Image (tube, helix red, strand yellow):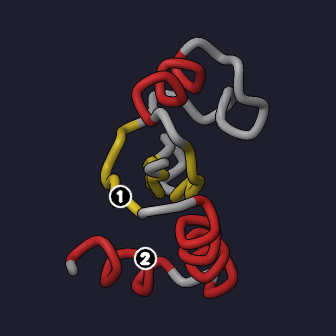
Amino acid sequence: MKWFVYILEMKNWKYYIWSSQNVERRFEEHNRWLVKSTKNNRPLKLLFVKEFKDYNSALKQELSLKKQKDRKAVERFMAL
């Protein structure tokens, strides 16, 4: 099954990075205040989506981006 890593920009200018099988449904959950970590930082903007062949590949990329804690690294990833 396909998995996706997506990046949101929150109103506080921070990035939210996560993985999901259904980005559209997940983005709707964010916008309906159903995700605790983003509900106080709306409006949200979906900046980037990348497809991966499986969960492990997507999770590996998600964790790699989160570990860097560097806005420039995330922006370089989105530019690829």
> Which tag is nearer the camera, tag 1 or tag 2?
1
Kindly state the secondary structure of the residue where label 1 is placed.
strand
Coordinates of residue 34 in the picture (x, y in percent): 70, 18
Q: Which residue is mark 1?
A: 51
Using the numbered discs, state the Cα–Cα distance from disc 1 to disc 2 in whole angstroms: 16 Å
Which residue is drawn at the image coordinates 51% and 58% (left, top)?
A: 15
Given the current orientation, which residue lies at the most extreme right position? 36
Amino acid tagged 1: Glu
Viewer-proximal residue among 17 and 21: 21
- Which dot marks residue 74? 2
Which residue is drawn at the image coordinates 61% and 82% (left, top)?
A: 64
Q: Please state if 50 lies on the left or on the right of 43 as rendered.
A: left
Of the image marks 1 and 2, the number of the one nearer the N terminus: 1
Residue 76 lies in what quarter of the image?
Answer: bottom left
Coordinates of residue 12 in the picture (x, y in percent): 54, 48
Q: Please state if 51 lies on the left or on the right of 22 as rendered.
A: left
